[in-house]
Image (tube, rainbow, N blue to C red):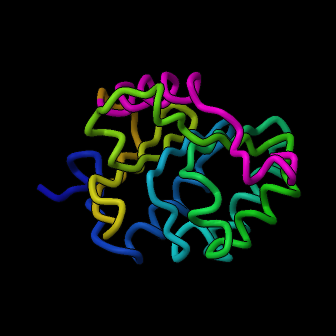
Amino acid sequence: MTDVDRGFTTLNGLDDSRSALLDLLDGMRRALYLYTPLVRPALYNDPEVLAAIRNRVVSQPKMRLHLLLPPARDWRNDCPGLVRLGERLTSALLLRTPNRQEIPDWPELGQAFAIADERMLLHFSDPRRLIGSYEPRPSQRLKELLDLFREVWNRAEPDPDLRRLSL
């Protein structure tokens, strides 16, 4: 039985992860929830990924992207395309930084995930090496991670390093 037969695709590295992220963005219609403790420029500053986000927002004006990222001082110089995209899509792209003092110490917060429309899950068990899985159908794991995202989102705050950009 292949991964696809089981309803998911195994991701092993940048090429697999980039392809899965582009597929997720292409299938997204209403909302994206992204949590990552590490912003990898090769993935999150990739011109094709940024163009897919921009095109999706332009074609779906009510789309909302909820991004929980580490402090911008850790990634903004390496990801200028993501910063520029945030400047241009201020009403669609909602960016927050987890408040480390207020969130529990859960192992899942060392992982990364993107959920589109509460039905597709891109999950990185190892965000440094971009190892994980892509599930294009709803699953129990997706529901658990979405609940975790919402809890962390509610305790998160706008990034002080990006306030000057009105993000």
Count of numbered labels shown in the rendering: 0
Q: Where is residue 160 in the image (x, y as percent from the top left)?
A: 73, 46
Q: Is residue 121 left or right of residue 10?
A: right
Indicate the position of residue 111 as horizontal and vertical percent values: 34, 49
Q: In which quarter of the image is the N terminus?
A: bottom left
Is residue 87 part of the magenta span, yes or no?
no
- Of 106 and 123, nearer the camera is 106
- Is residue 33 shown left or right of residue 110? right
Residue 139 position, x and y percent, is 33, 31
Give the vertical position of 164 relative to 50 (above or below). Answer: above
Q: Does the magenta stretch include residue 162?
A: yes
Image side of residue 79 versus residue 68, left or right = right
Give the prevailing secondary structure in the magenta stretch: helix
Residue 108 picture quarter: top left
Residue 72 image position (x, y, % from top left): 64, 57
- The residue depicted at 47 percent of the width and 51 percent of the height is 36
Q: Nearer the viewer, residue 122 or 4?
A: 122
Residue bounds of the magenta highlight: 141-167
**Image vertical order of residue 27 relative to residue 115, above or below:** below
Q: Name the residue: 50% across, 40% down.
A: 115
Q: Residue furthest left?
A: 1
Q: For the point 28% across and 70% down, which residue is it?
A: 12
Give the residue furthest to the front. Answer: 101
Q: Which residue is drawn at 47% across and 69% down?
A: 19
Compared to residue 58, the image places residue 140 above or below, namely above
